[in-house]
Image (cartoon, rainbow, N blue to C red):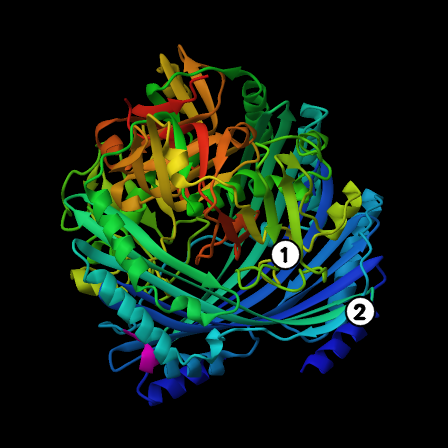
Amino acid sequence: MMREPLELAREAGVDATLTLEESRNVEISFEFNRLRSIQNTESLSYTAQAIRGGKRGVARSTRPGDEQDVLDRAIRLIEYGAPVAYRFPDPSPSRRPAIYSDNLASLSVEKLLEAGNDLSRFIKALHPDVNGIVKVAKVIRRDSIANTKGLDASWEKTVVTLIAAISLVEGQNLVDLWDFHSSTDLDWNLDRIKADLSFKFDLARKNVRVETGSYDVLFTPRAFGDLISPVIACLDGKAVTRGISPFARRIGEQIFSGNLTIVEDGTMDGGVGSRMYDSQGVACRRTPLIEKGVLREYLLDLDTAQKLGRSPTGTGGIAAIEPNNLVVEGGEVSKDDLLRGIRRGIIIENTMGAWAGNPYAGQVSGNIAMGFLVVDGKPVGRIKDCMFSANAFTHLKEHLAALSRETKNMFGTRLPWALVRNVTVAAKND
Amino acid sequence: MGKSMKDLMRKALKRSNAEYCEIRIEETEQVSVGFRGKDLDYVSESVDAGGNVRALANGGWGFVSFNKLDDLGRKVEEACSQAKILGDLLKKDIRLHPVDPVEEEVPGAFRAAAFAVPLSKKVDLLAKYNALALSQPEITSTNVRYFDRHTHLHFASSEGTYIRQEKMDLGGAVMAIATKGALTTQESARFGSSTDFGTAVGREEEIIRAAAAARAMLYAPVVKAGEYTVILSPDMAGLFVHEAFGHLSEADSLDEDERMKELLKIGNRYGPDDLDIFDSGIEGGNRGDAKYDDEGVPMQKTYLIKGGVVVGHLHSRESAMKMGEKPTGSARAITYRYPPIVRMRTTCIATGKHTLEEMLKGITLGVYVDGGFGGETNGEMFTFTASRCNMIRSGSIAEPVRDVTLTGNVFTTLRNIDMIGSDFVIRNTSGGCGKGSQGPLPTAEGSPHIRIRKVVIGGEGK
């Protein structure tokens, strides 16, 4: 159905791309240890991009059957549109990643309820006053892309997400813990989630004091995501071409510790962010960005690749660069061994507000929403009322001691545990 | 269109066999313009049309959202059927606080409708702002963003309510980016409104100030970590009250949690005698203002703290019934894809009596905090990051410092407010509030300067 409007556009001398996203989503929620709601969502969205005379117009619509209208509006917007120096690409083959599971697609609402009930009952049994929040969601999605050069492709994806959260108020002490699983296949392990939450719940109810100072910190994958977020922002081709990324003109330089390798992999099997083509019609691929600390490549779309004289990396979006799966490769040591090596340090499990700030300065500061003091290799209790502060550029270059061999899938990123030295922690005095 | 939509919705609702059922149908047209550096980055238009049905049976909520608006009756049956499946498992008595059925068409009362302004004029305005920011000393790049939305919203319930509301929302930010060696700093001029495109016009002085602040931060040292007395500017105090107390007052996180309910109990003291906090959807022109919320309840002004004491909470019909209070028109959904949950509108600390000079007096070493990147709370702790800060030394605002992030226990910090200023300002920006998976929802914040003792600030080690 998308070919006809594209043919008309081509005949009118317009270079155009049309995408369609269709999805069906079921989400089951438990709150206060009880089943709360079932939500069904059916959605679709067309996006049209049109280029003529070196300018681009973009339009979107969620009205069914709106492909002709959305493309017409994109063409009309060319008059006001952004100047571009690229054309949409000729069709090129792309690997079809294994991201669709029949087992998951056919999973019944009853099975989703069963998993949610299991986690909810487990949380309720932890403490009589605990508030357990569980969400179980299944998405079946179909993406289609076509352009005036003849590209015509579509692919399907299934994603299941489980979130289990514990909230307990004791006096003015809030214990807030959560864990999750996301995958394109039916491979959840509820026992692992339970064991992890149970261990942390006991630890989180015992408060210990910590003094302001500099510490060895073991970042869990979730917290490590905050620490590397300025790195990802600075690898973005738009930040590079605008000259605000400190990584500009440094390809081939050792900018981080030899422990750090970051790969963008758009066609990774089982990758929650995997797809065949990006939103500009470029085939997705595997691209090492940082290899053993050496800067190898940026995240590039058609525009930034053209400006930098490089090849696009299959990460083009409509208004921004869109990485698919960012993978920080694990190290040699287990996370338990990393922990055992800490004499006096901190585990940062979860941060709050660390996303806010100026990524191009590399500074990452936030409240340690959930963190544990470690003494002689063992976590001894929860630290409260304190903040951490690190600089991603200097800490990941000079103070990244090691990464764990285990990694965790974090909705489009896959990250290990990271041991970082000399992290400033500010604590309340009284 | 209004009348036929009303008839369609009412006809579909006749197929409800739940205790309560509602339909929302929404169509939003959006225009977006962005510049990065010297280049126009994008100009786009979008149409987002869809709807949802929400049904309650035996304490179970069913919710179905869709883009295909045909066969609404089948969607009603589907939501009712889900609610019954859940209700049979739950067998709970959930009731909604009664409200009078309403039949009303609420046309937009816009001072200057953004959707009536030609696209070329918006692009030209943003281009002028972008060029102005780029022309400032040491500004190497920019990130300029603008959007406006025009929404027609239809709401009908099995209780007989039908409301059609026309809404507008617009926001923008002109970010000036300064770079020196490997250090990049940034600061923005921001604006937003629910009624007036005029708020986007005449921002030149603010853009020049933002550029100067970004430039100043290039030469500012990182703040030393530790505990300080801080003075928050009205912008930052607004962000603080939103994060630190607004979220706690949202009753859907209290109504079944006995411990949190106890902490937020009416009559509990959490601040000095002159601390008043309120949340309002009817101040006029602020982002999030509307006549009705997404359950068809009139929005209102709700005091949360008066004289330092808890006096109210923000409610949906369900949470109000559970807690024996009245709905406050605070049930809001970000789009038709989500059910309404309890949210803030414009959250404010009311005007106090102190001047900034009085607040500075007596501070030997402190931090003056202005301009915020954003914040977050988990119900117990809050944190936010500032973009413009100065040390306070011997009662005077002194040298700038950067990378200031503040944190604290919500209750302790409220108690540590010791002075409230007389210079109230409401802050509308292009950002918004996130809760669950619904964000950014348009909200605004207001406050005068406030002074707080013993605030932990993250930064470099001493």
User: Sequence-wise, which precedes: disc 1 or disc 2?
Assistant: 2
* Residue type for callout 1: Arg
Whole-number angstrom distance, CA of label 1 to CA of label 2: 21 Å
At x 68%, y 66%, the residue is B24
Q: Residue under circle 1? A: B332
- Report if residue A86 is visible in the image: yes
Question: Relative to A104, does residue A280 appear above or below in the rendering?
Answer: below
Q: Picture coordinates of residue B150 (x, y %)?
A: 53, 72
Name the front one of labels 1 and 2: 1
- For the view shown, which residue lies furthest in the top direction? A376
- The region drawn magenta spans A78-82
Left or right of B87 in this view: A245? left
Check residue B382 for magenta coloring: no
Question: Relative to A383, does residue B211 appear above or below in the rendering?
Answer: below
Q: Picture coordinates of residue B167 (x, y %)?
A: 58, 69
Quadrant assignment, res A398 = top left
Q: Residue under circle 2? A: B13
Q: Picture coordinates of residue B413 (x, y %)?
A: 51, 30
